[in-house]
Image (cartoon, rainbow, N blue to C red):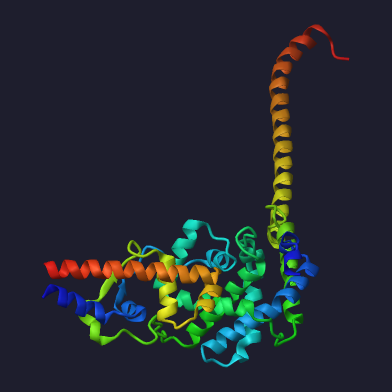
Amino acid sequence: MRKEKEKTLHQKVHSDAELWKQVSIIPDKSTDCPDSEIFSAWLDGRLTGAEQQRMEAHLCCCPRCFQAARSLRQIMEAPAEHIPCSLESIHALVPSWKNRQEEREVSSGWWTGTPAAVRAVLVTLSLLLIVAGSLYLGGRTALEQRQFQRVLMSELSFGLDDYHAFVPAG
Amino acid sequence: MLDDIDLTSLRQGNRSQWEQFVDCSAPLLATVIRKTLQGAGVDDSATSDLLQDVYLRLCRDDFSALARYNPKRSRLSTWLAVIARNITVDYLRRKRPEPVELDWNVSGHSDCFQEERLEISFQDLPPRQMLIMRMLYEKDMDVREVADFMGISEQTVRSGRHKAINKLRRIYKKRKTKGMKG
């Protein structure tokens, strides 16, 4: 009875295609879709052994990546077609980027990076501070001199009277 | 030739290197974009706009995208083709927000054997053999097409198929026997 059952089951899968039709693949969810570097390395046959295995496992389970891979393979093997537009506008992309690069190099310091109006205000304030400071210090010096003279004179006048008592003026 | 471009000089803003880069790569990238659009059933009138988008993406932020290219991993043309396709697919997704369900099965599994599904994992069958089987029996690709796709010889494809079939039959027989015993 069991042998007959085995025979019946075996007969149902007599062809490779029918056998495969019964297969249900347990997907490997551990691999994410490959990035551009891995994808292009696979196309050029430059993956390591482990990477190749992961890529093939992923292509088994991800119809989107499989379609992308198949499409790219076919395109890369086909001859390139004509360009649909003028490339002048694409050529011109570079000068604008180059100018921005130069501007960035120029404005890399803190002073040169500051706007002109701000720089003008800073310079004016600096000058005002210098002038005010000079005046203050100068005035302070003059005040101190006068105070010193008063002290000196008061001392001296006491001494001078005594002096003139002994030494006649003239 | 694209491989002769001095990318370092280009990224520093060398215009002649940029123009040479554009002139050498534009035919390939235009082809990638056009065929990707056509493959999705969309007219290819957006090809020139998408081509410009590709170069904009490459030179944006001081060529930061181009700086990520690693010449040891792939040819520049291959890497650029992948980038161009990704940009085109992003455009298609924006244009057609409803996801197109992709399915591996072309003809579908037979309903007759629903109760006898043979579940297998990559422990049962190596990824390469699994992929060969899927392409041969689900995508109806022939041996040559599979060999070209995988970058291997036709003999390797046939050998992989042979090994996979033998392994599957052994697994099938073992599980059926176990099932009947229980």
> Can you say which quadrant of the picture contains the N terminus of chain A?
bottom left
Q: Which of A60 and A9 is in front in this view?
A: A9
> Can you say which quadrant of the picture contains the C terminus of chain A?
top right
Residue B84 placement: quadrant: bottom right
Location of residue B39 with respect to A133 vertically, above or below: below
Q: Residue at the far top: name it.
A: A166
Q: Which of B72 and B43 is in front in this view?
A: B72
Residue A87 image offset from top left, x and y in percent: 74, 81
Residue at 69% of width from left, 40% of height from top? A136
Decide if residue B40 is on the left or right side of residue A97.
left
**Taking the image as drawn, is residue B57 in sight?**
yes
Residue at 25% of width from left, 86% of height from top? B111
Residue B94 image offset from top left, x and y in percent: 49, 84
Decide if residue B180 is on the left or right side of residue B56.
left
Q: Which of B76 and B158 is in front in this view?
A: B158
Residue B20 placement: quadrant: bottom right
Location of residue A5 with respect to A82 vertically, above or below: above
